[in-house]
Image: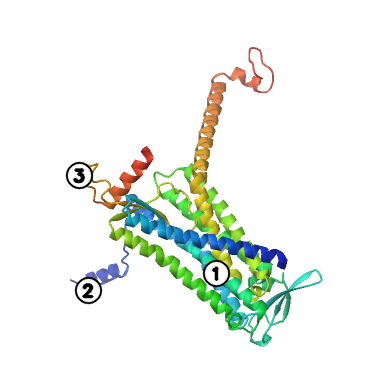
Amino acid sequence: MSPKVAQSVFLLFNLIAVLAVAYVVHDIVNVTSELAGKQPVIPLDTGISYLLLMSVFWLLSLVQFVGRRNKQHFIIRWSNQLVISWFITTLLLAYFIPVLLQGRLQQAGYIPCDDPQVVSRISRGASLIFVHGQVYHAADVQPVTQPEQVCELFASGLSTQ
Amino acid sequence: MTNRQQDLLRELQHNEHILHVVSAEDLQKEHLELKGNTKLIAQQVTPVLDALKAAKLIHEVGGFKPGQVVLKKYGNKQYVIFKGKAGERHVLKGTKYLADNPTVVRMAIGPKGIVKSAKGGFVITAVLSVSIEIFDYVIRDTALLSEMLGVITTDLVKIGLSTLAGVAAGLAVGSAAVIGSVAAAPFVVAIAVGVLAGFVLDKIDQRLGATQALIKAYARMGIMLDEIKYETSRNLKYLEDNPQFIPCLFGPCHGIRGY
């Protein structure tokens, strides 16, 4: 790949990284506000936070920017360590953000159900739909307390729609 | 107890084997619970291998110091130039190698090295994903062949496309100015872009229902094949019962239309 093409592709990925990280932030805000609004059903994809890995492009842009001006700058000397540390940090964030969100949702009485629309998935994480345990209480004579029952009722409700 | 009895007892205890008999239902339940985890492990294999390769490369070029590996083009040929002390390196003891040198490619250095490494990653992920789906089909009573084929087809397409995206990102970063000399950068971006591409493809599939459509298509194909099989066996049975019509298969026949 010629340096010119490589630079263009690199810039394109930088732009995509902005969109990816914005999407992650938007999703976290969405789930939090839905939780605050006590929505009966809250979808949560635990794989979205892995898009934070794309932010490594910003660090690489900084390394390139600094490197073009001063090759002896500490950012250049420590570039390998910085890239690896950034990667590990985002990986840890990607792992813990959904764990935290799931914990909050479950504390608030939501039950995680598999998204029945997902048949094949290659990306990290899982597509979950959190259904509030109280949703099926009013409709049934016997209150539904078992998580499996709630998920089954939710899935059957979706298939009849 | 006599000595003989004690000896026999000891011998029996020595040759004791414990057999656990698991019912098919329990095995299916266990499999369904573990399927998510096994898929997760399969997804992590390639990034872990990439990380190991990056670590090996960093170790080989003498630590984290950047600018130790530089790609340069002389004439029409691309070279990988190693800086630093050649004697401290374990595998690549020279200072200049052609980019398609087998040792350089094996170490995942340079464009060809990145492509070869990605190919290996694709094969491993594809084999693991397909194996999990086949095992699921074999073990689950409710599993359908059309379902398995549909999932495998879309999985392979998605894995292939995300690998390509990862390769493109790795090549771009490896060839870009300044950051091209950061040994860990191509691996890290290949993983990040691969993850992004996989996620986007999953979302597109979910939105468009590509896998569902494929499963339906395979199911229809199965019904068509069944119909063909039924028609063929019905015609063969007819010919068995009426052998006088066999010559009609090879030429025009009186009273038979549609030859």
Q: Residue at coordinates 73% horizontally, 79% vertically from top-left? A: B96
Q: Mark 3 falls within which chain? A: A
Marks 2 and 1 close (CB-CB < 8 Å): no
Instruction: Point out residue A49 in the picture as x, y percentages from the top left corner.
Output: 46, 62
**Chain-order first, disc 3 or disc 1:** 1
Q: Mark 2 falls within which chain? A: B
Q: Is residue B4 left or right of residue A9?
A: left
Image coloring type: rainbow
- Closer-to-camera residue (B96/B193): B193
Q: Residues within 10 Å of mark 1 (few under 14, many from 20)?
A: many
Q: Residue at coordinates 42% horizontally, 66% vertically from top-left? A: A95
Instruction: Point out residue B58 in the picture as x, y percentages from the top left corner.
Output: 59, 78
For label 3, the residue is A142
For label 1, the residue is A56
Looking at the rendering, which quadrant does residue A104 occupy? Answer: bottom left
Q: Residues within 10 Å of mark 2 (few under 14, many from 20)?
A: few
Q: Is residue B233 above or below residue A141?
A: above
Instruction: Point out residue A154 in the picture as x, y percentages from the top left corner.
Output: 33, 45
- Label disc, if present, on residue B59 of the rendered structure: none
Indicate the amino acid at tag 1.
Val
* Front label number (2 vs 1): 1
Q: Residue at coordinates 56% horizontally, 24% vertically from top-left? A: B235
- Label disc, if present, on residue B3 of the rendered structure: 2
Q: Is residue A25 above or below residue B184?
A: above
* Front label number (3 vs 1): 1
